[in-house]
Each structure stands twice: as structure tokens, then as C-alpha cells.
Image (spheres, grey):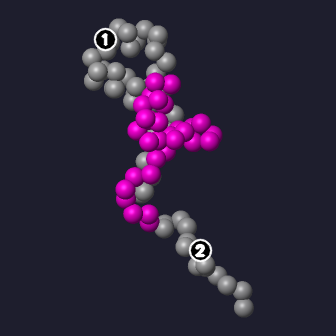
Amino acid sequence: HCYEWVSHEELEEIAVNHLQKKGVPQELIKSRTIDLEDYAGVLLEASGYEQASDGIGYITRNNLEFIREYTAPSGAGMTMQ
């Protein structure tokens, strides 16, 4: 809940949407002269995202509170008797 994730499969769509909003002609977008995946990566990094180490997407921290659904706070859990 406290992270935003953009998968690699979404990059082209992000770039196309951004270019269309900026008034770039559809012919230029479809011509493949713009590397849409790289362009989207630059947009995301400028917005505070970081590329995942495995390259499958981009991640950033949002302002929502961290909810421990799958992790426990340090010191919590079972103890040996």
C-alpha cells in the first residue's frame, strides 16, 4: 500500500499517453523513431521512481502508511524457550 509500481509492460502506454498530451503528432509516435520504453523510464525517474534491480519495472514510495501484511516488526515473532 505504501509503494507505487509500474511494470515494464506499462512503459510504452505511459510514453504514448504523455506524448499525446504534449501534442506530439500520432504519426511520429507510431513511427517508432522515439524509444517509448526509454522515454517512459526517463519520465518515471524524473517523478521519483527508481528502476527495479531486475529491470522488470519501476517503484516509488508514496505517502500512505506502511501496513505490515506480510512482514513483522523487528523483535516480533516466535522466541525459543
Is disc 1 surrounded by few (<14), some (14 to 19) or many (20+) residues within 10 Å? few
Residues in magenta, as a range? 38-67
Give the total number of marks visible in the rendering. 2
Q: Residue furthest bottom?
A: 81
Q: Is residue 73 above or below residue 56?
A: below
Q: Is residue 11 left or right of residue 64?
A: right
Q: What residue is shown at x 42% (from left), y 31% (from top)?
A: 43
Image position, residue 57 (x, y; %): 53, 38
Which comes before the other along the chain, label 1 or label 2? 1
Q: Quadrant where the N terminus lies?
A: bottom left
Check disc 1 and report its element: helix, strand or loop.
loop
The residue drawn where x is 54% and y is 39% is: 51
At numbered mark 2, what does the secondary structure look like: helix, strand or loop?
loop
* Image point (40%, 12%), residue name: 30
In the image, what residue occupies the spot 40% across and 52% down?
62
Determine whether 27 is above or below 5 in the image.
above
Image check: 69 left or right of 30? right
Q: In this rendered view, identify the residue nearer to me: 60 or 67.
A: 60
When the figure is inspected, residue 27 is found, relative to residue 38, above or below; the finding is above
Which of these two is toward me, 50 or 1? 50
- Disc number placed over residue 74 in the picture, else none: 2
Residue placed under numbered mark 1 in the picture:
25
Q: Residue furthest right?
A: 81
Q: CB of mark 1 within 8 Å of CB of mark 2?
A: no
How packed mark 2 is, by other alpha carbons closer than 10 Å (few <14, some 14-19, many 20 or more), is few
Distance between the alpha carbons at the discs numbered 1 and 2? 53 Å
